[in-house]
Structures are given as C-alpha cells and as structure tokens.
Image (cartoon, rainbow, N blue to C red):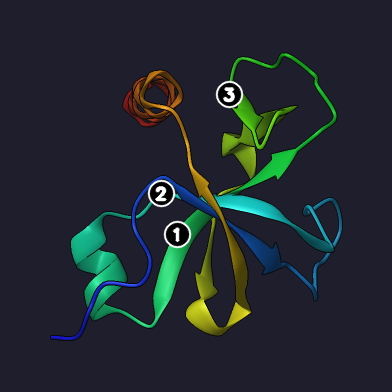
C-alpha cells in the first residue's frame, strides 16, 4: 500500500461539476469524511461540501477554515473520484470533527 494522500477531516478544493438539480456545484472547499482505510484502498472518497452561506440547519456544522466562517453541509454527502481533488486547505479543528461525527451518527440513527 502506498502513502496515504487523503486523510479524514482534511479539506480540499474539489470540482463538483457536473451536478444535477439542487446539488452543490462548482469548485468549492470540501471535507473528507471517509475513514483513512477507505481513502487508502479505494479510488473514491466520501466528502461533504463546505459553504459560506450560513443557514444554521440541524444537519450542518459550523466551522472556521483558513479564518473564514462556513458550514459543512452534511445534507450534501457524496462519493467523488480522487482526481477531483485540488489543493489542500488543511484539517478541521478537533471540536468541529467531533460535532461532525455526532451529527452523522444522529442523522443515520433515526
């Protein structure tokens, strides 16, 4: 197995085009949610887009990324090919990652 390039809770610029309907589109920051073993072994990763439009919905997580406020849109989860990933934007804070895990567990437990 090669060196792990993509780690859980790291954020990247990702080109989400093409999209359909109300899917988040364009080149935007996204956070990797798939576990590191999946990221190492598969050609795809599971991501959630980050938006600067703050809506305070129960399935969104407020974050600060590179000094800017945003929300991780857990309602827009998708698997993408690794070739879509651009420049790394860094890792989310531990408090933010814990909130993402909590909200995902809540979303999928209901």
Q: Percent position (x, y) of residue 103?
A: 43, 22
Q: Quadrant of residue 100?
A: top left
**Residue pictured at 58% horizontal, 23% vertical:** 59
Q: Are marks 3 and 2 in contact (CB under 8 Å)?
A: no
Label 1 or label 3, whichever comes before in sequence order:
1
- Between the C-alphas of marks 2 and 1, the distance is 5 Å
Q: Percent position (x, y) of residue 83?
A: 56, 84
Q: Percent position (x, y) of residue 52?
A: 81, 33
Q: Identify the secondary structure beneath mark 1.
A: strand
Name the residue beneath numbered marker 3: 59
Q: Percent position (x, y) of residue 90?
A: 51, 49
- Between the C-alphas of marks 1 and 3, the distance is 16 Å
For this view, does 20 lie left or right of residue 75?
A: right
Q: Which mark is residue 83?
A: none
For this view, does 9 lie left or right of residue 18?
A: left
Q: Which mark is residue 33?
A: 2
Q: Identify the secondary structure beneath mark 2.
A: loop
Characterize the local packing of mark 3: few (<14), some (14-19) or many (20 or more) Cα atoms within 10 angstroms.
some
Name the residue beneath numbered marker 1: 46
- Between the C-alphas of marks 3 and 2, the distance is 14 Å
């Amino acid at each position: 197995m090669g060196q792990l390039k993509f780690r859980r809770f790291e954020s990247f610029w990702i080109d989400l085009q093409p999209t359909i309907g109300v899917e988040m589109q364009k080149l935007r920051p996204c956070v990797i949610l798939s576990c590191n073993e999946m990221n190492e072994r598969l050609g795809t990763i599971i991501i959630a887009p980050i938006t600067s439009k703050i809506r305070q919905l129960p399935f969104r997580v407020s974050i600060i990324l590179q000094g800017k406020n945003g929300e991780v849109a857990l309602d827009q989860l998708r698997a993408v090919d690794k070739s879509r990933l651009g420049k790394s934007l860094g890792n989310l804070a531990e408090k933010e990652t814990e909130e993402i895990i909590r909200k995902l567990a809540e979303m999928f437990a209901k």
